Amino acid sequence: MRFRLHLFCLLLLLAGGPLPAQVTGDVIGQHGFGSGGSSPVTGSLPGSCQYCHAPHSGLDAGALWNQTLSSQTYTPYSSSTATGKGNAQPAPGTATSLCLSCHDGTVAVGLTAAYGKIPTMGAMQSNDILGTDLQASHPVSLALPLKDRIDLFASLAAQGKTADPTGAVALINGNIECTSCHDPHVEAKDPVARNFLVRDGSNGQLCLSCHDPNRTITTQVNPLAGWAVSIHATSSSRTALSAGIGSYGTVTLNACTSCHVSHNARGAARLLRGPNEQDCVACHGGGSSVSPAPLNVFAEFSKTAHLLPSGNNLHDAAETLLLNNNRHATCVDCHNPHASSPTLSFTPPPLLRPSQTGISGISALDGVSILSPAVNQFENCLRCHGTSAGKLLNPLYGYHPLRVVSAGDPLNLIPKFALSSSSSHPVMHDRSSPLPQPSLRSQMLQLDGLTLGRSVGTRILCTDCHNSDDNREFGGGGPNGPHGSKWTHLIERRYEFSQAVSPGLLVTNLNPSPDLGVNGPYALCAKCHDLNQIAANSSFTEHARHINEGFSCSVCHASHGMGGTNASISGERLVNFDSSVVAPNGTAPISYSRATNSCNLTCHNQPHSPSLGASIKIRN
């Protein structure tokens, strides 16, 4: 009896004083290795303290240590965004080395210094074994001194203090150790998670003791900025415990642990529950993980979709924002999970929608300057679709017209949308056409082709054309944005490109007198342009004839903008012929002039020449 009382006093001493009043019952929980304890491993000794501590003859490792220490060399946590000198090997006698004497899985429970090998039954749970590769666990035993960074509280490096108001989350001898977050003597200070946490970890309180979303430094970008008002910090949606996305029952309560895990992370760098986009699929891939369920974004990827990272185009948080020779589109390329909020109302372009709050981009002024955060939606798109090197035409997205006039790189959208372009869709600048536009609607049509939607206005977004084919903004039930579409080029509605076997020969892929409605080959154009006006030749005397003969808009018009200048083609009204469909007429170059109402080319086996009286006529 006296021996047990001595051990109980020793336990209180090691715990730092009397136990908190709110903890009742089996306080030591799964560390109760004694016979009759609640641990999956139990031994023949009746008490639990002796498995780790010995009042006499313990190891010279502090804490009167009894369990045999591991002699392993560990691979510490590292990442491309880590600062400082990295992690050191846990020094013998530090709290981390004591914990690893069981949790690296190389030394059996019950191999004691004072009592020899104590017979045990059972085995540790697999998620409690960290192994010797600590890359997938939160960094501990850092190389001192601690290095400061913008997403940490300044007091960590400056004063050796966390921001935990309770004082429970603390540095150990100026370092982060296992016992900074875990109290090995009390399992349920956090009664929900029951992970021996030093305090309640719900709402991210444990993480936010060190990580500061609100800190600002003029020359740096805080990757956690906007956290407090983001959807991942405020959503009351219920989460299923079986989904493995936190212990606390709602998105808000799970907070950081919805996406990050402290130990045995599958996405080791930055401790993600799953690498890159796989971290998002648990909630945004359908199923019953979250209630009410978010829209199933991952269902869109079964269609023609943005390229997810694969073995040869991996995403990394430290990569340059201008994605040279490494184009990919994982979720965090377009969404900042620490700042993103749901889009509840569709604000006018060109500004980013709330779902992209806090995301970075590239300036359209020079194509290289980094904007963190971006302001306009197109700036985020320019990470890949601007000046980045290594862009390739991907057959996955369908036919790509080859324009007669080009600025050099046909996949660089900046010169096509630039204010200096002779004509362009108004994405990067306001609409300012000096020519009448009789076909232009005042409001865009919804996906049904009948209901009026958002005002056309003076600007449009990239996602007004490149969007999921069932997107919510225009009347569908699916997620917004260019995640995936059943139509080529990630466009939200059907838009056919006329093609020819060889330039100048017959165009055969469209039927004569095509459907001008929502199911027809011009459905995307019909979103903003009244095709009845176009078929009535309101702006061009030959529109009806070309449509009735089965020609696509793409033969004569560039969908983005001119992108260059040419003496033979003025470029007004987006007229820029597809040189894979049309050919020169004789030795003269392909030409078009609105001033003279003429074109000179060969198309569909027909020569067009002003000298032959085949000039085009445009009505003002």
Image (cartoon, grey):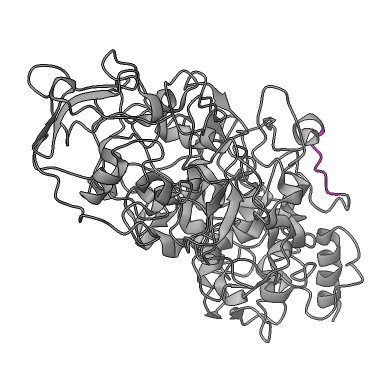
Q: Is residue 494 above or below residue 39?
A: above
Q: Is residue 74 above or below residue 251?
A: above
The residue stretch that appears in magenta: 159-164
Q: Position of residue 500 (x, y in %)?
A: 13, 42
Location of residue 103 (image quadrant): bottom right
Q: Is residue 560 above or below residue 594?
A: below
Q: Mostly what secondary structure, the magenta segment? A: loop
**Camera-side residue: 618 or 166?**
618
Reply yes or no: does residue 567 show up in magenta: no
Q: Position of residue 166 (x, y in %)?
A: 88, 53
Location of residue 118 (image quadrant): bottom right
Q: Is residue 238 above or below residue 132?
A: below
Reply yes or no: does residue 163 show up in magenta: yes
Count of number-bearing discs: 0
**Camera-side residue: 335 or 571?**
571
Q: Position of residue 398 (x, y in %)?
A: 25, 48
**Camera-side residue: 380 or 91?**
380
User: On the picture, is 45 further left or further right than 477?
Assistant: right
- Tell me which residue sits at (56%, 66%) in the image: 128
Q: Position of residue 97 (x, y in %)?
A: 61, 51
Residue 359 visible in image: yes
Residue 74 visible in image: no
Which quadrant would the C terminus be assigned to in this image?
A: top left
Residue projecting furthest to the front: 613
Which quadrant would the N terminus be assigned to in this image?
A: bottom right
- Tell me which residue sits at (85%, 73%) in the image: 23
